[in-house]
Image (cartoon, grey):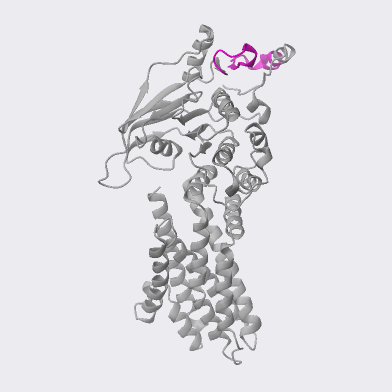
Amino acid sequence: MRSFITTMRPRLYRYSTMRLSHVSFRYRWRDPLIIEDADAELSPGDVIELTGANGAGKSTLLRLLAGLARPTAGTITGRPAVVGFAPDRFPAGQPFTVTQYLRHMSRVRGGAPWEPWAERLALSHLLGLPLGELSKGSAHKVGLVQALMAEPGLLILDEPFAGLDADTREALPAIATEVAAGGGIVIASDHQAGLRALHGVRHWSMIAGRLKESTSDTPAPEAEPAATGAATTARDAPSAAAARRSGPPGGPSERRHATVAVTLPAGDVQRFLARMHGEGFQAREIEESG
Amino acid sequence: MIALVAFRLAAYVRSHRVYQALLLALALLAILYGSRAPKGEETSVLTDGAVLIVPVLAWAARSLLDTEPDRQREMSAIQAGSRGKEVAAGLVAAFATCAGLAAIALGWALLLGVSATPPPGVLVAVIALHALAALAGTALGALTSRAIMRSPAVSITALLLGFLATLLLSTSPLYWLTVPLIPWMRAANAGDLLGRFPELAALSLVWCLIGLAGYVWRRLRTS
């Protein structure tokens, strides 16, 4: 088992805890508030599932988190430097093929590698097609690739499972897990409960403009106590030991995988990595602190 | 930001929207310079060309900025790292387009519109006027683009009325309240373009920058 992100670019995520303090939002003066007095904290390693009825303010909250809109009142602080945003409807009416579009986006991102993501999301056979000829699901994948290519510290997915084929629907939770395991924050508005199988996922709901966090968790049937505790630790302190599990609940054990962060003296890093490699594990150095 | 400018320009060309402005510009130039101006009228002919190309340049700038879907504009802002960079990239791409069209206009005028090459001083002033025309077109096009005016009917009406209002106001003693297009032409006709150039160029630059600042302010305020 290997971490896909690990093999792509051995670069640090920019760890950052985001805070929403008394955030309210309305589009125009005298309009009713779309979001009212939202308070929340998003820590590195969090995977958040955002649910709510149509028009409850989910997309508006995601726009606020992405920095596309400013709160009418309150503050949002600590937004990671690199944000990836996959919209619910990808704007396919653009005069590019998939390759041309993704190349342009890669250049805007400073040369981020997009090809591995296109391959992983089963987009390779569509690269020569004009964006306007893609199906809704395929266009949605293009939106996902452009959001993922730059290793975002904050990954925002607006209805990511809508219109996707079964293989990609299965791949997305693992991708979310990997981004979180690398220190990123993942938040997805989701009507289809596609992330619910993930262990340790936080559940937010928008109800009439109010943001509420559900304290109940959906435990993975095979979750072990040690992994559970480590996952919680990761949410609170990314430099501490952390673990995330993904994969189909109850599925074959060989398909499950976990990413574990270990803190140890800098002088022991090479020896530790060599030992891990010797035992057949994928391991890499993430950060030197202090 | 350069990559985002290239993306905007590529979309403008690949969507074929560029040909709308280009054909309009070529039609205007064919009419303006259908026959060569007599010797000695180079300054006024070249200055008139710089003024009359402004609405075409504004159309081109508006068209370029409107090529990108609204949702893509948001994604571009996130990709670039901030809304400000996305706005700046759009303006740079629009100005590059306007400058290209203005260069074509000036080249056509020098090759086919006049009977003699103007003196070096006048030539430099005329080149500067075409650059200012590109800037004025960028500002007018940006202020009437979809991000500012949602309705296409309102937008194109505002663009044309904006240009006409600039012309009318600049015929009055209050010409300093706008880009002084008519005073450019009057100064050139009177053979005083070089003498009044510093004043008129400064006024033009200031109003163009005010227009662009208004666009940036609106874009950032409404984001």
Is A46 positioned to the left or the right of A255 in the image? left
Residue at image point 51% right, 88% down: B191
Segment tinted magenta in the rendering? A248-273
Q: Is residue A259 magenta?
A: yes
Residue at image point 35% right, 37% down: A55
Q: Is residue B118 visible?
A: no
- Report the residue that reaches farthest toward the left: A30
Q: Nearer the viewer, residue B206 or B111?
A: B111
Q: Nearer the viewer, residue A126 or A281?
A: A126
Horizontal and vertical percent for residue B38?
A: 60, 92
Q: Is residue B105 magenta?
A: no
Task: Identify whether A126 is placed above or below B53.
Answer: above
Residue at image point 55% right, 23% down: A177
Residue at image point 44% right, 66% down: B140
Q: Is residue B86 visible?
A: yes
Is A282 positioned to the left or the right of B126 in the image? right
